[in-house]
Amino acid sequence: MSLKWDDVKKLAAKYDKKNFLGEYLKWGERFQKALEKTPSLGISYKTLYVVGMGGSGIVGDILRDYLGMEMDIRVFKYTRLPSCVGKGDLVLAVSFSGNTIETLSSVSDALSKGADVIGITTGGKLLELSEKKGFNVIRVEKALAPRAALPQLIATALKIILGEKAVEELMKIADVLRDEASEYSLDTRDNKAFKLAYYIWGRLPILYADEGYLSILHRAKSSLNENAKINAYYQTFPEGYHNEVEAFKEIIDPVAYPIIFKDHGDNLEPFIKHLDDLEMDYLIIDLVGESRIEKILRAILLTDVASIYLAYLRKKDPFEIDVINKLKKMRG
Ligand code: PA5
C-alpha cells in the first residue's frame, strides 16, 4: 500500500472532526443495550408492514432478508400504504429523527386504515403523534446520525418482532460486532475495512449478491453515497442473469468494479466464472456468520466502515450530508 498509515490518521483528524468512525466502533455495545432495554411486547399480527426511509428504512430491508421467508413482511418506503392494510396488521414505523415526512404520512395512513402501529425513534413528531393517538413508541439511544444508529434500530425491531426467546442468539452477534469493530479502528494499520476502501478508491463500485441479501447491497450503496460521496450501483441474482450479465459481453468500462458478496450455495458461481473468462478485475467479500442476520450485520459493518475510510481518502467529511439536508428543506 503506497499510503502510509500515519497519513490515513492525518486525513481522519482533518476530515472527520466529529469522529464519525468512532460511532461505528460502538455497534456491538449499542446492539446489546437495545436488546436489553426493549420490552417484549408479545405482539401478534396478520402481516407486518415496515415503513421508514434511508438509514431507518434499511431496518425493513434487513428484516425482510432475515425473516421474510417465514413471515409475511412487506417493506414500504413511500408516503402511503396499500388498500389491503387494515385491522389485525401491524405497521412498524422506523424513523431515527421522528420527523421524516414519508414515514409520518405512512403512519397517518396506517392509523386511518385501522392498523396497529409501533414506532421506533429518538423522538420528534413521531413521538408527539404517538402521544396524541395512543400507539406504542420505543425510544432508541441517540447517535450522531441515523445511519450510525443502525444497531439500536435493528436490535429494537428484532426484539419487538421475535420477543425474549431470540435474545440469547442475538447477544452473541453483539459480541462478534464488538470484536470485529475493534479490528477496523485506526489502531489497526491497513485493516480489512481500509483495504476495501483502497480497492474501491477511484472506481465505480457495482455491488452484487443473491436476492436474499438485498439489504447488504442497498446499505452498501447508501453508505458509499452518504459517507464517501460517490455513486454506486447494485443488482441481485438470479435476476441479474436475465439482464445485467449482457453488459459483460466485453470490458467496456475499466472504471466499473464488481464487488460480489458471496455466500455458500448462492446463485453467483456462473457469473463469477464469466468474469474470470473475461479477465475482469473484481472483488469477492465472503459472507461470514452462523445465521443470516449475523452475515448481514457483519457485511454491513465492514462496508460502512470502508465507506468512511473512502471518505478520508477522498478528503470528504463522512458525517456531512449537505445535499440530503438541502433537498429535505426544499421538500418541506
Ligand atoms: O442517513 C440518513 O441520514 C438518512 O438516510 C435518513 O435516515 C433519512 O433521511 C430518514 O431520516 P430518519 O432516519 O430520521 O427517519
Image (cartoon, rainbow, N blue to C red):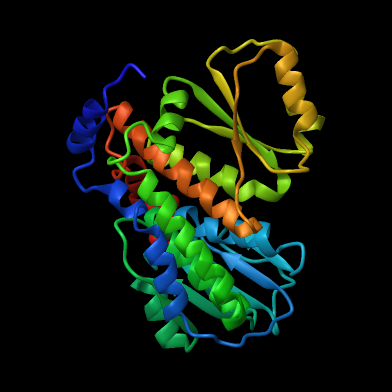
Q: Is residue 134 above or below residue 226?
A: below
Is residue 279 in view from this perspective? yes
At x 42%, y 54%, the residue is 179
Can you say which quadrant of the picture contains the N terminus?
top left
Q: Is residue 96 above or below residue 250?
A: below
Q: Quadrant of residue 287?
A: top right
Q: Is residue 267 above or below residue 253?
A: below
Q: Quadrant of residue 90?
A: bottom right
Report x, y in % for residue 52: 52, 61
At x 46%, y 72%, the residue is 120
- For this rendering, which residue is in front, 166 or 86? 166
Report x, y in % for residue 206: 58, 29
Q: Quadrant of ligand 1?
A: bottom left
Can you say which quadrant of the picture contains the C terminus?
bottom left
Is residue 109 in view from this perspective? no
Report x, y in % for residue 180: 44, 50
At x 37%, y 73%, the residue is 125
